[in-house]
């Protein structure tokens, strides 16, 4: 499953499910025959199922999962005898126990259940979606919501085959995991029955059903049928996704050495969807804006997002669907592997996208959580649905992917691939644990993958490697020291935490990289050339931070554009920013380095600089330094923006367009350039009248920068576009998200009220509110609004990223006084589903306040000297 917005809180369920536990290890399913009859108008459904099970020992009772299910009739057949079963519900644990008068004999049995359920409005299980004046029935089962669609064994280790059929309105169609085998009228008036092919063995959370007026664009890859499906109005936007899916499916077939096993591949955009996408076997579901792209107007960011999320979900067809973790504590075997794999097809298909830089950004995202004391190990014990859904976070996704890249880089890509292929073959249609993976890869490669991987998986935190290098004639002596990195000034580190870290050096003009395995607290290494300023993280592939002396950082940065790859430059700046955040270096070291790289031609490098300078502007500077800091930004970065020009052309290379957009925001917003804001407003007005007047990659930034000084008249024009653009998701969200950039207090209030109105989908409500909490000019008003409307919000928001997203957004505050206020609020209004999220948010507030205390004076000093 691809989360919508990784930096936000982990997916979470409602507090009502906090007591659910593991099923007893007794009876196990082998096959489900499922029949559903959804009633879209009344938001209910009827269900009928037969479950074939194995019974290892005689028993009178069988316990399975069920939630929000009304059992009608239950019978169990065993040994030629059918008995009616009594049903005992445990609502807190979301389980049902079926008891028969006479014990079932060891062997096989068959359970027959008829029941009813609700098509809920909470975006989980079998639920109701609405668009274009009509209703849809769709599913989202992961992690623990298959039990809301059918009683069964809703745990990943219980793999079964599934036969699925649906009785639906005659004017609708349906999509499921298997290919459609038949479509027959009746047996009820005004209905028809669709029957789908039997699935291979898979876990219950991968079952998918979609009912409505979906239409599809068809293609194929390696003789596998591929379709991208949508509501009728979105069909013109499906072409790019189909092209990407075909490319990626071919890539994975070849890379894994195992041809896709689920028969056909459908990819479906859903109007209401809490996550970003979901890897249901053979029927991947998507949030619309993550899947659809206008062939004429799509920005580079949208094209990369669609291709990347698709690649992530298609990777899951092997990593998660074919081979599934035994239990949710190893969810990283699914999500981390899909994240790691996702950029490989993109690099082959569009090398100009420089997706290796996205890999480095993922490492920095992971560190943002792993630098907290409230982080967690990649493998974390979980039992309840709340606990399970909280581990769908940056640790499971980005940290795991970064660790895999570290080992892949050390072992060698081709050897590592052979190990992964062997793992996939060995555990196909089965379940695996982390030990199964690293043991198999170590066996195949002959490298100590198990010794390296185990501490990264089982202990929390990110390592920082202190590097001291000195030339000795024609060689370089290197001293290395490792410790756990803690991202707050004045914090001591744990002396007991050690990793086996493959530290790989890149020397100027020397290839290949030089690697050493750092297993001790302190260790020596030697490079065969004089390279005192060598990069200690070749191509930014390692999951560790490199700490150099301040003078070394400045020296490396001065020559970086000629001596380091873009990935290494991005890694250098990202690591140095963490040294500033942790109080290890004064902020002036970073600002000098950023100044040296201000004209960098890699968009990701410029984005890193822009993000760090925005944080500095909002959270570090003393009030009397703000004007001089803004002046420095304008002097240092506006010339580059002028060289690139506004608005540019849609035919410009992608990297040029991306840099233009980043610099426009940096100079116009953080640099507070009145001239740039005026240009943005002029462009925004032109864009509203003629969308072709501004290149797609620049359009979103233009709307945001224009809004900074925008008035009610401009706000009204943005609002007026929304109902016109429901069939164009990217354009719609450009305007919707730009509403949060208006600074007029009255307009902030309008956006807050709009967020909870019927005109906004519940999937978007928390996004708008969380975004406003993250804006310095709006956060107090947004927080006041949240407190005043808490009861409404908790009742209406979706369960995946609603309340937890808002809870996580309070991390944007930066004072201990505000921390005390939000702590008190959540003490009085607990959110069990976001327990870890809130602990991390409170720690982030403390850390931000500490950065202000530690770095505001050095920033002032730097501005009075170096910035002149």
Image (cartoon, rainbow, N blue to C red):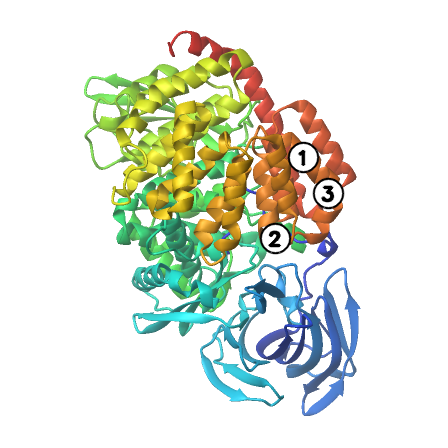
Label 1 secondary element: helix
Which sits in the foreground, 256 or 24?
256
Name the image quarter holding the C terminus: top left
Labels 2 and 1: the sequence-earlier one: 2
Which residue is label 3 attached to? 789
Label 2 secondary element: loop
Rendered location of residue 169, percent (x, y): 58, 80
Which sits in the foreground, 205 or 269?
269
Task: Please indicate whether residue 257 sits to the left or right of residue 46 in the image.
Answer: left
Task: Please indicate whether residue 345 sits to the left or right of residue 789 in the image.
Answer: left
Which residue is label 2 attached to? 759
Q: Residues within 10 Å of mark 1 (few under 14, many from 20)?
A: some
Question: CA gap, disc 1 to disc 3?
Answer: 10 Å
Q: Which mark lies nearer to you, 2 or 1? A: 2
Vertical comparison of 840 with 335: above or below: above
Question: CA gap, disc 3 to disc 2?
Answer: 17 Å
Which residue is label 1 attached to? 783
């Amino acid at each position: 499953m691809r989360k919508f917005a990784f930096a936000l809180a982990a997916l979470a369920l409602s507090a009502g499910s906090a007591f659910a536990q593991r099923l007893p290890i007794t009876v196990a399913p082998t096959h489900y025959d499922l029949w559903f009859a959804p009633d879209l108008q009344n938001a209910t459904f009827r269900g009928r199922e037969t479950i074939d099970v194995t019974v290892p020992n005689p028993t009178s009772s069988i316990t399975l999962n069920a939630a929000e299910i009304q059992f009608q009739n239950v019978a169990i057949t065993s040994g030629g005898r059918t008995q009616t079963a009594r049903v005992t519900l445990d609502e807190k644990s979301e389980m049902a126990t079926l008891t028969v008068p006479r014990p079932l004999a060891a062997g096989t049995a068959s359970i027959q259940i008829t029941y009813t359920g609700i098509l809920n409005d909470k975006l989980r299980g079998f639920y109701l979606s609405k668009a274009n004046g009509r209703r849809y029935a769709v599913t989202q089962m992961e992690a623990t919501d298959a039990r809301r669609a059918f009683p069964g064994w809703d745990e990943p280790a219980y793999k079964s085959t599934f036969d699925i059929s649906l009785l639906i309105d005659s004017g609708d169609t349906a999509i499921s995991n298997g290919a459609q085998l038949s479509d027959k009228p009746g047996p009820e008036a005004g209905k028809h029955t669709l029957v789908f092919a039997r699935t291979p063995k898979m876990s219950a959370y991968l079952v998918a059903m979609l009912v409505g007026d979906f239409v599809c664009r068809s293609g194929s890859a390696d003789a596998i049928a591929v379709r991208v499906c949508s509501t009728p109005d979105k069909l013109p936007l499906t072409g790019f996704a189909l092209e990407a899916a075909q490319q990626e499916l071919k890539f994975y077939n070849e890379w894994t050495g195992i041809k896709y096993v689920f028969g056909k591949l459908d990819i479906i955009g859903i109007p209401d969807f809490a996550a970003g996408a979901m890897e249901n076997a053979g029927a991947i579901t998507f949030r619309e804006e993550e899947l659809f792209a206008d062939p004429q107007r799509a920005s580079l960011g949208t094209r990369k997002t669609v291709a990347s999320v698709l690649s992530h979900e298609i990777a899951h067809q092997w990593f998660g669907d074919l081979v599934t973790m035994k239990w949710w504590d190893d969810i990283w075997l699914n999500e981390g592997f899909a994240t790691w794999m996702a950029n490989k097809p993109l690099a082959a298909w569009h090398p100009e996208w420089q997706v290796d830089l996205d890999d480095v950004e993922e490492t920095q995202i992971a560190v943002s959580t792993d630098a907290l004391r409230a982080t967690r190990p990649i493998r974390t014990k979980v039992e309840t649905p709340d606990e399970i859904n909280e581990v769908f976070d940056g640790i499971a996704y980005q940290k795991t992917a970064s660790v895999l890249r570290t080992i892949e880089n050390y072992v060698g890509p081709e050897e590592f691939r052979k190990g992964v292929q062997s793992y996939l073959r060995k555990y196909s249609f089965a379940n695996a644990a982390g030990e199964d993976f690293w043991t198999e890869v170590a066996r195949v490669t002959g490298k100590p993958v198990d010794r390296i991987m185990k501490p990264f998986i089982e202990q929390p935190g990110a390592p920082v490697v202190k590097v001291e290098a000195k030339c000795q004639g024609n060689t370089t002596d290197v001293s290395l020291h490792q410790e756990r990195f803690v991202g707050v000034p004045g914090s001591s580190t744990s002396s007991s935490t050690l990793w086996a870290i493959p530290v790989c050096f890149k020397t100027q003009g020397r290839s290949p990289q030089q690697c050493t395995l750092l297993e001790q607290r302190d260790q020596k290494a030697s490079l065969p050339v004089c390279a005192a300023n060598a990069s200690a993280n070749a191509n930014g592939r390692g999951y560790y931070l490199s700490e150099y002396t301040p003078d070394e950082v400045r020296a490396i940065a001065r020559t970086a554009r000629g001596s380091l790859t873009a990935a290494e430059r991005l890694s250098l700046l990202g690591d140095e920013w963490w040294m500033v955040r942790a109080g290890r270096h004064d902020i002036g070291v970073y600002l000098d380095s950023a100044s040296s790289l201000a004209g960098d031609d890699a968009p990701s490098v410029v984005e890193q600089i822009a993000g760090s300078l925005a944080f500095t502007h909002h959270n570090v500077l003393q009030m009397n330094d703000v004007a001089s800091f803004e002046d420095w930004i304008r002097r240092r970065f506006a010339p580059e923006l002028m060289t690139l020009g506004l608005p540019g052309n849609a035919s410009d290379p992608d990297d040029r367009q991306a840099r233009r957009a980043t610099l426009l925001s940096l100079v116009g917003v953080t640099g507070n350039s009145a001239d740039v804001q005026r240009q943005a407003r002029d462009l925004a007005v032109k864009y509203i009248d003629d969308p072709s007047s501004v290149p797609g990659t620049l359009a979103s930034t233009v709307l945001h920068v224009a809004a900074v000084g925008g008035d009610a008249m401009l706000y009204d024009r943005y609002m007026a576009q929304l109902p016109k653009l429901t069939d164009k998701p990217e354009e719609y969200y450009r305007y919707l998200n730009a509403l949060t950039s208006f600074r007029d207090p009255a307009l902030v209030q309008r956006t807050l009220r709009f967020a909870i109105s019927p005109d906004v989908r519940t999937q978007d409500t928390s996004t708008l509110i969380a975004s406003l909490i993250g804006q310095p000019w709006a956060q107090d008003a947004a927080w006041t609004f949240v407190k005043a409307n808490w009861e409404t919000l908790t009742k209406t928001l979706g369960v995946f990223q609603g309340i937890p997203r808002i809870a996580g957004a309070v991390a944007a505050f930066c004072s201990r006084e505000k921390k005390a206020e939000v702590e008190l609020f959540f003490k009085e209004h607990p959110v069990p589903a976001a327990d870890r999220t809130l602990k991390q948010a409170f720690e982030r507030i403390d850390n931000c306040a500490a950065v202000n205390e530690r770095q505001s004076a050095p920033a002032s000093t730097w501005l009075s000297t170096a910035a002149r």
